[in-house]
Each structure stands twice: as C-alpha cells, then as structure tokens.
Image (tube, grey):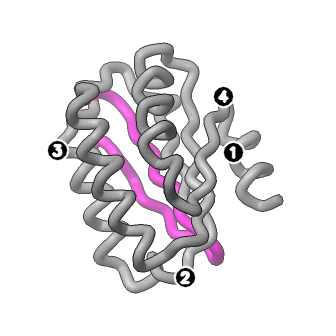
C-alpha cells in the first residue's frame, strides 16, 4: 500500500509514495469516503511529493474527479490541497481542478506540505 492516511482534528493528509496506480488512488479515496469523519472534515491534502511514478491516466483522473464531484453531496465545504513538483502529476491535477470547477470545493496546488497546511488552515 503506497500511501498513509493521517486524520487530524479538521482534516486528513494522504501521503503517497513510490509507484502509485489508479487502483491505489481509488483505494485511498474509498477509505476517506467510508470514514464517518469525512462528512465534517474541512480539508484534505494529497501529498504526492514522494511519488516516483504516478500510473494514472487522464481518463482515470476524470473518473476520480467524477467521484469527488459526487462526494460533494456529503461534504460541500472542503479545501482539497495537492502537493507535488512533478510536472506530469501537475498536468493531471490541473485536469482534475478544471472538472471540479462546478463544485463548492476549493482546489489548491502546492510545492510543499507546509504551504498546503498554511492554505487549508487559513
């Protein structure tokens, strides 16, 4: 399992590392959505800074965005921060961000976890 999930009082941090596939990304999302804390969280941070290979396509990114779009029904006030410097992951996050425009979620992209934490806590 190339990720860890750390719940905090107001949110959650998912740290991905190594080689990450679409299925593993979906497994992490599934854990978040099944947890009763999801309904009251204020933020989620997806930290991809330690990912060496991200095996997720544009089509799969669209699937993730569609599922997240649906999850806004249960929690419409989320700041979703993404942490990476990887240009191919940034491209997919930009696609995700575009597809989440019609929601009330705020989507952010940051180079460091510290920057993401500052943003979600503001």
Neighbourhood count class around disc 2 (C-alpha, 10 Å): few under 14, some 14–19, many 20 upward: some
| Element assignment for label 4 | loop
Question: Badge 4 is on which residue?
Answer: 111
Neighbourhood count class around disc 3 (C-alpha, 10 Å): few under 14, some 14–19, many 20 upward: few
Identify the disc placed on residue 116: 1
| Element assignment for label 2 | helix
The answer to which of marks 1 and 4 sits earlier in the sequence is: 4
* Position in image of residue 100 (x %, y %): 47, 48
The answer to which of marks 2 and 3 sits earlier in the sequence is: 3
Residue at x-position 75% and y-position 40%:
115
Rounded to the nearest angstrom, the CA distance separating label 4 from label 2 is 26 Å
Question: Badge 2 is on which residue?
Answer: 40
Q: Is 16 in the magenta?
A: yes
Rounded to the nearest angstrom, the CA distance separating label 4 from label 3 is 24 Å
The answer to which of marks 4 and 2 sits earlier in the sequence is: 2
Q: Which residues are magenta?
A: 1-19
| Element assignment for label 1 | helix
Residue at x-position 49% and y-position 14%:
87
Question: Badge 3 is on which residue?
Answer: 23
The answer to which of marks 3 and 1 sits earlier in the sequence is: 3
* Position in image of residue 51 (x %, y %): 40, 27
Q: Is residue 26 above or below residue 41?
A: above
Rounded to the nearest angstrom, the CA distance separating label 1 from label 4 is 8 Å
Rounded to the nearest angstrom, the CA distance separating label 3 from label 1 is 25 Å
Which sits in the foreground, 22 or 14?
22
């Amino acid at each position: 399992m190339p990720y860890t999930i750390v719940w905090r009082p107001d949110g959650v941090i998912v740290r991905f590392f190594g080689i990450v596939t679409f299925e593993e990304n979906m497994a992490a999302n599934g854990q978040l959505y099944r947890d009763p804390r999801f309904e009251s969280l204020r933020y989620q941070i997806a930290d991809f800074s330690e990912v060496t290979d991200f095996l997720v396509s544009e089509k799969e990114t669209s699937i993730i965005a569609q599922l997240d779009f649906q999850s806004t029904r249960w929690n419409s006030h989320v700041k979703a921060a993404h942490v990476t410097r990887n240009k191919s992951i940034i491209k997919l996050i930009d696609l995700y961000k575009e597809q989440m425009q019609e929601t009330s979620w705020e989507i952010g992209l940051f180079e460091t976890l510290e920057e993401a934490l500052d943003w979600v806590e503001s």
